[in-house]
Each structure stands twice: as structure tokens, then as C-alpha cells.
């Protein structure tokens, strides 16, 4: 059974949602039979890679808040992250284009190192004093994940390298109706949006596992009729859209 996760490295609820999903997966008796695939979703796809700014300033501008109010928003999300055992800095973080990172993640997937690089990128962005939007840092993370340095450097230097793979993921997200991340699709049947509690993931995995044979027959019938079955969705939870991130801890 496959779980696909659309996310962005700049999205705090993707960082938190991944930890909650992993707790939900750990409680699932058939977790060894689950394949997890991470897919690309840029919250700011038109951003110039050279345009990097402090997160607090970006939040204040986007939401029309004072810097103090923006810091309070960050503290609110940080509390949710720390409740999951995750590190989260509320000062000194940057915000920028994640296109290069997504391309590196596709390189990492080709080498079986995608999950490792994703975890390193999340930790660097949210918990450490490292800007993932600096190409030097991005290259260092790729090497830490076990990728060949020259190959990773070549990908970073060529904006077309793995660009189509990133865009294909984003087109697929749009076709599934995903306008916010994190977005989880279980067996192409159950859509789960946002940083849901861990038990929501366990329940969805269990339901998909128990009904997969009947549902596969139904999907085959729909495909034979030219239909593309869309996944059903769970209830709302904190998430990020191109317009901003929901500050509620959920």
C-alpha cells in the first residue's frame, strides 16, 4: 500500500505533519507493508531564488502584522512542533524559493535517499542555524544525505535538472484538488489534508488496508469507464497554502 505526501520544505505544518504521520504509521500493524513517497509542492513557485528574507519579516508583510505579532505566530507554531519532539527556532530563520531543494529531493529519490535528505532539510530549516536557501548549505545537506557531491552540485547548477519531475508532482497535486500542504493520499483512495493528529493517519491506513481489495475492483471499474477516482478527504487541519500558513496548532 502506498502513501504519497505532497509537502514543501518551507512549510512548518509539513514538518509537523510528517512527525504526526510517522507516529500514526508506527501504530499501524501493517506498517512494513506501506511504501511512503514524498512529492513536491512549492508554496511560492514564482519566487526568485535570489530573493531570501527573514521569516518574521515575511510573516509581518504577508499578514499585515507587526513584527511582534509575527513572532507570536511563530511561537504558536513552534509550540506545536515542540509537542512532537521537534526542534523549532523562532528567530534567525530565512524564507525563500524551495525549487532547488525539490530538485535535489528527486535526485535523492533516484538514489534511495529521499527520506534522509528531507529530514535533514527540515531540521536545517526549522531547528538549526542553517539557511537551506543557500546553495552551499543545500549541497552540504545533499552530501550529508549520502549523495555524490559532484552529481548534486551539477543538479543545483542546472535549473532544468529534475525540473519536470517537480512540475509533474505539482500538476498531479492540482488534479487531485490539493491546494494546501501537507497533503497525504493513502492508496489513492483517502486524502488527508493538513497536520492531522496521529490517530487520524492510523485510522485512514487501517481503513484503506481493510478495504483495499473491494476498492481496487471499484477503481478498476471506474478506470474502464474513463473515470479518474479522486481520494476522499479527512477533516480540516492546520496547513499552508500559497497565501500563507494557518497559525492554529489544531
Image (cartoon, rainbow, N blue to C red):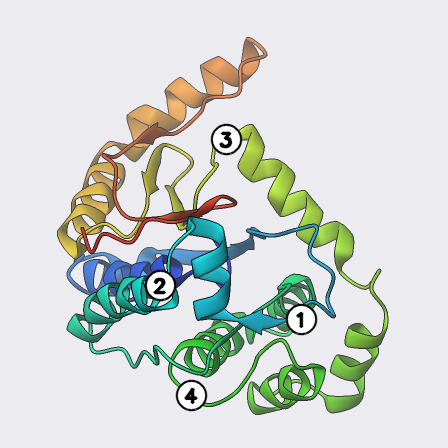
Image position, residue 97 (x, y; %): 64, 63
| Mark 1 vs mark 3, CA separation in Å | 24 Å
Measured from the top left, where is residue 220 in percent x and y? 47, 21
Tell me which residue sits at (43%, 59%) in the image: 60
Q: Quadrant of residue 103?
A: bottom right
**Residue at x-position 25% and y-position 37%:** 236
Q: Would you say 75 lies left or right of 245 here?
A: left
Sort mark 3 into few (<14), some (14-19) or many (20+) by Cα contacts within 10 Å.
some
- The residue under label 4 is 128
Q: Which mark is residue 202?
A: none
The residue pinned by badge 2 equals 70
User: Pointers 2 and 4 in contact (CB under 8 A)?
Assistant: no
User: Residue 177, position in %: x, y?
Assistant: 48, 29
Circles 4, 3 touching at the beta carbon (< 8 Å): no
Instruction: Choose between 226 and 192: the one closer to the eye.
Output: 192
Residue 217 shows up from this direction: yes
Q: Nearer the viewer, mark 4 or mark 3?
A: 4
The answer to whether the residue labelled 4 contacts the one labelled 1, judged by CB atoms less than 8 Å apart, is: no
> Which numbered tag is attached to residue 176?
3
SS class of the residue under badge 4?
loop
Q: Is residue 11 left or right of residue 18?
A: right
| First of labels 4, 1 by sequence position | 1
Label 1 belongs to which residue?
104
Q: Of the residues under marks 1 and 2, which one precedes in the sequence?
A: 2
- Callout 1: few (<14), some (14-19), or many (20+) C-alpha neighbours within 10 Å? many
Marks 2 and 4, how far apart at CA: 20 Å
> Which quadrant of the figure has residue 173?
top right
In this rendering, would 23 be left or right of 245? left
Amino acid at each position: 500500500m502506498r502513501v504519497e505526501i505532497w509537502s514543501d520544505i518551507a512549510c512548518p505544518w509539513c514538518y509537523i505533519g510528517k512527525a504526526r504521520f510517522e507516529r500514526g504509521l508506527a501504530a499501524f500493524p501493517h506498517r512494513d507493508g506501506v511504501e511512503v513517497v514524498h512529492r513536491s509542492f512549492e508554496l511560492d513557485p514564482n519566487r526568485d531564488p535570489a530573493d531570501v528574507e527573514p521569516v518574521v519579516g515575511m510573516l509581518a508583510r504577508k499578514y499585515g502584522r507587526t513584527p511582534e505579532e509575527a513572532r507570536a505566530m511563530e511561537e504558536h507554531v513552534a509550540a506545536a512542533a515542540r509537542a512532537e519532539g521537534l526542534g523549532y527556532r523562532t528567530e534567525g530563520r530565512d524564507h525563500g524559493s524551495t525549487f532547488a531543494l525539490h530538485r535535489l529531493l528527486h535526485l535523492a529519490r533516484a538514489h534511495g535517499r529521499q527520506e534522509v535528505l528531507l529530514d535533514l532539510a527540515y531540521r536545517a530549516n526549522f531547528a538549526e542555524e542553517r539557511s537551506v536557501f543557500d546553495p552551499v548549505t543545500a549541497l552540504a545537506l545533499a552530501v550529508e544525505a549520502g549523495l555524490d557531491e559532484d552529481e548534486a552540485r551539477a543538479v543545483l547548477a542546472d535549473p532544468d535538472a529534475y525540473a519536470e519531475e517537480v512540475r509533474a508532482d505539482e500538476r498531479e497535486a492540482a488534479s487531485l484538488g490539493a491546494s494546501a500542504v501537507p497533503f497525504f493520499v493513502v492508496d489513492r483512495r483517502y486524502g488527508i489534508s493538513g497536520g492531522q493528529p496521529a490517530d487520524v493517519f492510523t485510522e485512514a491506513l487501517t481503513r484503506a488496508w481493510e478495504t483495499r481489495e473491494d476498492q481496487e475492483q471499484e477503481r478498476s471499474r471506474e478506470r474502464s469507464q474513463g473515470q479518474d477516482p479522486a481520494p476522499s478527504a479527512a477533516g480540516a487541519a492546520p496547513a499552508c497554502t500559497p497565501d500563507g500558513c494557518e497559525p492554529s496548532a489544531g
